[in-house]
C-alpha cells in the first residue's frame, strides 16, 4: 500500500503549493479519492489492506478486524470500529474514509423492484436494481460495471452511449453495500433469510471489458468473512468477450450468462458487432470449457425476442444445434423498446411458442417478464429515464437490470 500512501502525500504536497485543479479532482474521484485527497477503504482487497496496515506497523489481526467492520458489519465511519485503538482510528481517518456513493434517486416499483441512481465522486452515475423473488424472501441485486458501454449492440440503449469510464472495484461493490444499507441487512446474516441473496452483473456496461475491477469487487463480495455471497449466487452476463470468459472461469468460477441473441454469425454480426471479433464457434468453445459448468449450474443463454428478426421456429432449431454440448438453458427476454430503436418485441404468444420449441428440443427456456416497469427499471428503460431526467449521457442501463430473473435467482 506504499503506493497509496505516497500517492496521497504527493497529491497533498502538490495541492498545497498551487491548489488542486479540476483534472486533479476527476483523477482522484476515479481512484476513489475524496476531494480532500483521502482514499476510500471500500474496494481495497485483503492484500491491499494487509499491506496498508503493515506499513503502519499493524498486525494481520487488525486486517481481520477492519475487514469485519467494513464488509460484515457495514460501518460507514472509521470511528465506529470500536475494538480498534483510538490512536489507530485517528491515523487512519487522516488518509482514509469508508465511502458510499451519493443516492440521487431511490425508487420502488409496485412490484417491489427497487432502483437506485448512484453518483460517484466525479459526478458520473450508475443505476443499481434490486429484483426480489416473487415467492421467496430473496432476490438479486443487479450491478453496473461501467458508465456507458464501448459496444454497440443494436437493440440495446446502453449501446448508444459512449463509454464514459470503467467503475472502480469500490464503486462496483459499494452498489451492493448501498442496497444492504437500504434493507438494513448488516451484519451479514450468518444463516437464514437474506433478502439480498444474489448478485447479477447485468447492469450497465460490459463487465468483461472491465474485468480486473469486476474481479476484485466480486472477490470482496464472495469473501466468507465479509459480505459472503457464495460463488453459486453470483452470475456475470457478457456479450461474449472470449479471452476474459476463460479468465473469469478460472479466477472466479461464478455463474455465466451469455447475451447470445442470434443463432448464426450473419445475424449476430449484424446485431452484436462484437461477434466479428469473437464469432460463435469461439464463443461456444469457451462455453463448453467453462469451469463449473454442469447440469446443476448451466450457462444461461440470454435471448432478446426481436419481432421478425430472430424469433422464427427455424431460429429456435438453429439455436439448439448451436449449443450442442454446452450445458445451458435459455432465458427469453421480451425486447423493451426505447426511443429511437428500430425493433419491435415479438408478440407474447410467439415468445411462448419459441420457448415451447426449445423445450421440445431439450432446452429449458423461461421467459424473463419485465419487472419494475412503472419506475422504468426494466430492460432498456433505465438509460432513457436517466437521459430524460438528467439530459446527460451518463447513468442508467439499457439492459436487463430490473427484469424478472427467476432463472438467475431461484435456480441457484
Ligand atoms: N453487457 C452485458 C451485460 C448486460 S446484461 C451483456 O451484454 O451481457 C443485460 C441483458 O439485457 C443482456 O442480455 C442484453 O443483451 C439485454 N438487453 C439489452 N437491451 C435490451 C432491451 N432493450 N430489451 C431487452 N433486453 C435487452
Ligand atoms: Fe453493451 Fe451489453 Fe448493451 Fe451490448 S448488450 S451494448 S455489451 S450493455
Image (cartoon, grey):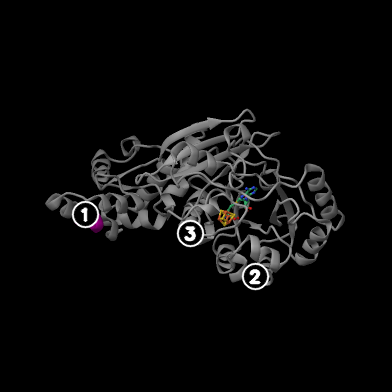
Image location (x, y in percent) of residue 218: 51, 53
Disc 3 and disc 1: Cα gap in Å? 26 Å
**Which percent across, then down, holds residue 99?**
37, 42
| Residue 302 on the magenta segment | no
* Image position of 187 with respect to 240: above or below: above
User: Disc 3 on helix, strand or loop?
Assistant: helix
- The answer to whether any part of residue 191 appears in the image is no
Region of the chain picked out in magenta, as a range: 6-11
The answer to whether the residue labelled 2 contacts the one labelled 1, judged by CB atoms less than 8 Å apart, is no
Front-most of residues 149 and 85:
149
Lower position in the chain sequence, tag 2 or tag 1: 1
SS at circle 2: loop
Q: Quadrant of ligand 2?
A: bottom right
Q: Residue furthest left?
A: 17
Question: Is there a contact, CB below 8 Å, between mark 2 and mark 3?
Answer: no
Q: Name the mark on residue 279.
A: 2
Q: Which is closer to the viewer, label 2 or label 3?
A: 2
Q: Can residue 379 be seen in this view?
A: yes
**Residue beneath label 1, please?**
11
Q: Name the image quarter holding the N terminus.
A: bottom left
Mark 3–mark 1 contact, CB under 8 Å? no
Dividing the picture into quadrants, the one containing residue 80 is: top left
Q: Point out which mark residue 210 bears.
A: 3
Q: Which residue is drawn at 23% across and 58% down?
A: 6
Amino acid at each position: 500500500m506504499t503506493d497509496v500512501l505516497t500517492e496521497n502525500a504527493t497529491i497533498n504536497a502538490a495541492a498545497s503549493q498551487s491548489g488542486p485543479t479540476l483534472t486533479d479532482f476527476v483523477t482522484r474521484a476515479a481512484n476513489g479519492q475524496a476531494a480532500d485527497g483521502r482514499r476510500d477503504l471500500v474496494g481495497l482487497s485483503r492484500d491491499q489492506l494487509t499491506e496498508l496496515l503493515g506499513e503502519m506497523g499493524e498486525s494481520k489481526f487488525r486486517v481481520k478486524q477492519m475487514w469485519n467492520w467494513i464488509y460484515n458489519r457495514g460501518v460507514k465511519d472509521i470511528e465506529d470500529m470500536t475494538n480498534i485503538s483510538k490512536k489507530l482510528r485517528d491515523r487512519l481517518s487522516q488518509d482514509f474514509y469508508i465511502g458510499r456513493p451519493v443516492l440521487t434517486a431511490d425508487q420502488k416499483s409496485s412490484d417491489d423492484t427497487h432502483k437506485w441512481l448512484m453518483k460517484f465522486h466525479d459526478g458520473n452515475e450508475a443505476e443499481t436494481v434490486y429484483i426480489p423473488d416473487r415467492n421467496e424472501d430473496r432476490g438479486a441485486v443487479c450491478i453496473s460495471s461501467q458508465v456507458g458501454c464501448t459496444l454497440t449492440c443494436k437493440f440495446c440503449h446502453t449501446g448508444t452511449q459512449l463509454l464514459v469510464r470503467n467503475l472502480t472495484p469500490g464503486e462496483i461493490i459499494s452498489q451492493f453495500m448501498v442496497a444492504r444499507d437500504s434493507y438494513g441487512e448488516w451484519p451479514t446474516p450468518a444463516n437464514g433469510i437474506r433478502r439480498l441473496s444474489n448478485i447479477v452483473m447485468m447492469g450497465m456496461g460490459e463487465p468483461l471489458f472491465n474485468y480486473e475491477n469486476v474481479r476484485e469487487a466480486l472477490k470482496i463480495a464472495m469473501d466468507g468473512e465479509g459480505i459472503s455471497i457464495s460463488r453459486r449466487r453470483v452470475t456475470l452476463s457478457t456479450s461474449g468477450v472470449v479471452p476474459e470468459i476463460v479468465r473469469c472461469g478460472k479466477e472466479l468460477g461464478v455463474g455465466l450468462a451469455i447475451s447470445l441473441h442470434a443463432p448464426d454469425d450473419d445475424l449476430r454480426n449484424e446485431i452484436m458487432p462484437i461477434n466479428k471479433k469473437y464469432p460463435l464457434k469461439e464463443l461456444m468453445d469457451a462455453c463448453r470449457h467453462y469451469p463449473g459448468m454442469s447440469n446443476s449450474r448451466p450457462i444461461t443463454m440470454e435471448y432478446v425476442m426481436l419481432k421478425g428478426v430472430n424469433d422464427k421456429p427455424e431460429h429456435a432449431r438453429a439455436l439448439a444445434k448451436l449449443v450442442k454440448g454446452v450445458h445451458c438453458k435459455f432465458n427469453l427476454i421480451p425486447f423493451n423498446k426505447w426511443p429511437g430503436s428500430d425493433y419491435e418485441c415479438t408478440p407474447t404468444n410467439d415468445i411462448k411458442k419459441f420457448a415451447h420449441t426449445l423445450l421440445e428440443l431439450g432446452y429449458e427456456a423461461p421467459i424473463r417478464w419485465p419487472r419494475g416497469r412503472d419506475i422504468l427499471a426494466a430492460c432498456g428503460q433505465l438509460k432513457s429515464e436517466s437521459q430524460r431526467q438528467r439530459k446527460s449521457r451518463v447513468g442508467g442501463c439499457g439492459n436487463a437490470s430490473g427484469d424478472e430473473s427467476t432463472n438467475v435467482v431461484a435456480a441457484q
